[in-house]
Amino acid sequence: MIWLTSLFVIFLVFIVPGMLASTLDIIPYGDQPGYNSNQRLAVYGERTVSQKFISTEKNLAAIGTSIRNPNLKNKKEIILSLYDEDKNLVRTLTLNGQNFQDGDFVKFVFPEISDSEGKIYTFTISSPLAGPEETVEVFYFGGATENILEYTYDEKSYPGGLPIVTFYKPNSKLEVIKKVYSNWLSRLL
Amino acid sequence: MKKLIFWAILLRLLVAAFLFHPDIKTYNFQASFLKKGVFNIYTYLVDNKKSLTLKDDFVYFPLTYFAVGGYQWAASPIMGTGFDSWLADASSTSVVGNPNIFKYLVVLKLPYLILDIWIAFLLKKFFDKKEDGEKAFIFWLFNPFTIYLIYAFSNIDIYPVLLTLVAFLLLKKDKLMQASAIIGLAAGFKLYPILFIPFLVLKGKDLKEKLLVGVIPTLILTAIVLPFWSPAFIQSAFVSGLTTRIFNPGFSIGFGESMIVSLLAMSLLFFYGWLVEKKLNLFNYWVILLLAIFSFSHFHIAWLLWIAPFAVILSVKKPQLSLPLFLIAVLSLLIPMFYEDRSMAISLFRIYSTWYDLIPTPFAILEKFYNPYNLQSILHSIMAGGSLIVGYKLLRREETK
């Protein structure tokens, strides 16, 4: 009994965190920036929003942001189109509004871009088939950050933009496990 | 002995420091108003909801507020200046990223450690034979279930659990009145011990004793609750979802009426004890009552602690029930893991990394190929079946005094 319980605790405290880390296919760069929930941009029909950002790591594999779907009315396609600095379309991803709740943090996951480190990208979020009654809303904040540069709405550009989190595919599972334990230990010691 | 206790404490400190359930921050944030002089936390939280960063109601009974708040006041010099702002922090990310979180968790869970070890010593006293007492002592200190329940989930229910155990020690010495008073006190922390009052009444030798045994805990609970009695208290604690969950309707019997299964089971047990049983064994009835609650209600994982010390006693008294009880415990812990609630599983480890927020819950994983509610129902049904048979065995007049 003593051994069983001791092993259980050791497993729970020291092993499970590593096991959980090994299931991660993508890892985020930093936390989601804070935003004012009253500052929102409506997206429907021809109204789109574009965001310019720097990919801080290689293997860019997903972009996430908080999206409102008021009263879950939007059940249409929501498209994220990702362009490189030369405005070439590099990835397109389509989600359906019915798949996320109002205010959800929505991740657009795509095949990773291996040479993304340090490059500037722009993505556009649109819902072309949605009418004004089926609008979705994205949040925004003013002032550029280290990697969130500027956003464009109604053909005007402003510094700052959507509170996005970029995600990267790690080189190996071991790298993720190592990062999790070293982050934990660095705070502990 | 000392080495065993040291090892038991070390294991507990590991779980206490590194596993984090957000409830501990919520109720400590609420209890922090005691050191600012707030007496009635229920009305205070409702009146100031708009300006507070955490807007939850205080769902526990008054003694919990004073126990948690009083300890926090005493421990505040250790906590340092950033502690109150950590409690008030509504961001789930910065809360776990705070470098002091390990200290905060260990210090906040320290009273549980004291009560936990105290329970181990009380269990020793429950037995006439020294070796049985030592077995119970070890079972309590070294079982994975209670360590997980108390320290991962920051289980505040340990206060009433300790008091109900004290009540049973008094019952063992035929001190019915004192036991009923302790049950009243325990209900001042959380309401569930009052479910036992009808059975205490049955145990009374004559009408006078029966009346007193019923009235004493009711008066104590009334005295505790009365200063707080208000719409805010009623709404937040007295008829909160958690308090009333035991009595959620079961199946319809037509015309808007429902049969409340757990209440039906309690009623069956009460009338069986009254009309059929010749010599009431209160310990067995308490265990069966709790097993019935867990069998027929959508229980909160923290509730499982209510039965833990009594399951240990039962395992020692009736070793043939150890394995079935172990299996029932495993099933009972598995069921909440499949709730659609991140804090039942993965979120407990957010101290290590917030990247775990990307991992789907067991509910979400299962949902891809099977209905998780079906799995919960399957596990719950098996658990209930096992519990009913254990209850049946206990009712067959086998001594477990």
Image: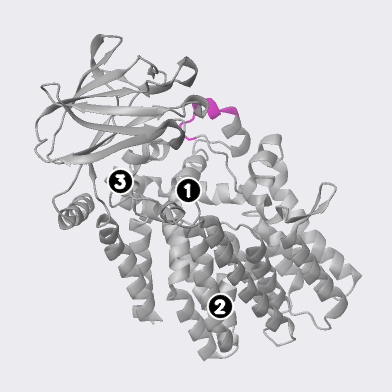
Range of residues picked out in magenta: B47-54
State yes or no: residue B155 in magenta. Answer: no
Give whichever of A86, B65 is nearer the camera. Answer: A86
Q: Residues within 10 Å of mark 3 (few under 14, many from 20)?
A: many
User: In the rendering, which numbered label is found on residue B325?
Assistant: 2
Distance in Å between CA atoms under marks 3 and 2: 35 Å
Residue B49 on the magenta span = yes
Question: Disc 1 marks which residue?
Answer: B23
Q: Is residue B65 above or below residue A162?
A: below
Q: Percent x, y for residue B80?
A: 33, 43
Which residue is at 33% across, 32% downward? A94
Chain of the residue on which disc 3 is drawn: B
Tell me residue B263's x, y (percent): 75, 61
Q: Amino acid at mark 3?
A: Thr
Distance of label 2 from label 1 (alpha carbons): 28 Å
Discs 3, 2: same chain: yes
Q: Position of residue B217 (x, y in %)?
A: 75, 59
Residue tagged by mark 3? Answer: B354
A12 versus B28 height, above or below: below
Q: Secondary structure at mark 1?
A: helix
Q: Which image quadrant is residue B196 in?
A: bottom right
Where does the N terminus of chain B fall, quadrant-wise?
bottom left
Q: Secondary structure at mark 3?
A: helix
How far apart marks 1 and 3 lie (CA) works out to 17 Å
Q: Nearer the viewer, residue B134 or A185?
A: A185
